[in-house]
Amino acid sequence: MDLKNRLSEIAETASTEFANTHSMEELETLRVTYLGKKGKLTQVLKGMKDLSAEERPVIGQLGNKVRDEITSQLSEKKALLEKAALDKRLSEETIDVTLPGVKPKKGQGHVITQIMEEIEDLFLGMGYQIVEGNEVEEDYYNFERVNLPKNHPARDMQDTFYITNEVLMRTHTSPVQARALETHDFSKGPLKMISPGKVYRRDTDDATHSHQFHQIEGLVIDKHITMADLKGALEALAKKMFGEDREIRLRPSYFPFTEPSVEVDVSCFKCGGAGCSVCKQTGWIEILGAGMTHPEVLRMSGVDPEVYGGFAFGMGPDRIAMLKYGVEDIRNFYLNDQRFLEQFKVKG
Ligand code: DAH
């Protein structure tokens, strides 16, 4: 049989065989049978070297045509088989939409964040606004504007990290008082604010000291504010954080930015006031410092102390969290140990 006939026969059998193929494996075997290195087509084309110069291009062309036909039949069949396989899978697979899903693990805020948000919620509910301050603060606002001039002895307790001689990491949230006072427009109403945030001190870290911790500052300035208003606000705080039965007491103290100044104690939430190890047998636990805003602080911010006055307070959420949850070492809050942190869920 000459090459021409053999090529036509290959083309013919290939097309019937492809048509009768029903699997990818069979198709692959056919591809090798026809187009492989030792395949039928290759075998025939090898015989071309014995042909005459006139016949060679004719057979060559025919050979190419047959190869193209087989190749395109092959890819058509492949596409068909793939589609059939997909259709089969889709019709077989079912999804049970009634199966319960995988519940994502819900995280929670850091325990200090949770405590701060709880306190923020309380004060927002009493009409206070939340004011953000700067952690990198000027000496001028951190100290001078809250009545702690250069060389004031009370600065000793608040050494910090300095950026330059005049710029430092704030040692308390009190500078926010000065910044809020100078921008507040008293013709629009009283200033009632709290300011939560991080503060810094050059302390040696131990169980009760950390070089970075948190404070929440409070300030209320209007025309007729008295110490009774301060006591009312702080009593609401003590009850919210430590239970409805709590009482507070005020003890005289000293802060340069308030006059008079007080330390605020809450009746012991553990023993109710009888005396226990939490309150060191006194029945009371100190929770914050407060007082009536010093006239000088108002004056320096351009507010007339003859007309306006009010109170301020400053508390440490770290200390409140330690008391509330019986945490004995403040450093636990900053180690980011999940096993420690996961224990605290203030809200649902
Ligand atoms: N700034 C004080 C401190 O860091 C805390 C403080 C006490 C703030 C009394 C106040 C206040 O606003 O009235 O030790």
Image (cartoon, rainbow, N blue to C red):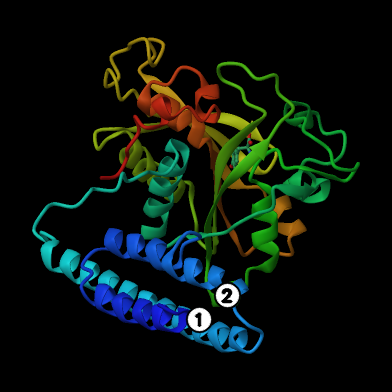
Report how many numbered discs are placed on residues in the image: 2
Locate residue 144 relative to residue 29 in the image: left or right: right
Amino acid at circle 1: Gly
Residue 218 lies, with reference to residue 169, above or below; the image says below
Specify which label sits upstream in the sequence, 2 or 1.
Answer: 2
Q: Quadrant of residue 241?
A: top left
Quadrant of the rendered structure where residue 208 is? top right
Q: Secondary structure at mark 2?
A: helix
Residue that label 2 marks: 48
Residue found 61% across the figure and 16% down from its top: 206
Question: Is 287 on the left or on the right of 178, as rendered?
Answer: left
Residue at the image position 76 percent from the left and 49 percent from the top = 137
Q: Is residue 265 visible?
A: no
Q: CA separation, marks 2 and 1? A: 10 Å
Please tell me which residue lies in front, 40 or 241. 40
Mark 2: give few (<14), some (14-19) or many (20+) Cα within 10 Å: some
> Where is residue 179 shown, x and y percent of the image?
69, 59
Task: Return the x and y of residue 3 as percentages of the image width and height.
Answer: 47, 79
| Kind of residue at disc 2 | Met
Q: Say the numbered circle drawn on residue 63.
A: 1
Q: Outermost residue toward the right?
A: 165
Coordinates of residue 228 in the picture (x, y in percent):
42, 47
Do the CB atoms of the residues marked 2 and 1 lie less than 8 Å apart?
yes
Seen in the image, is 19 located left or right of residue 94? right
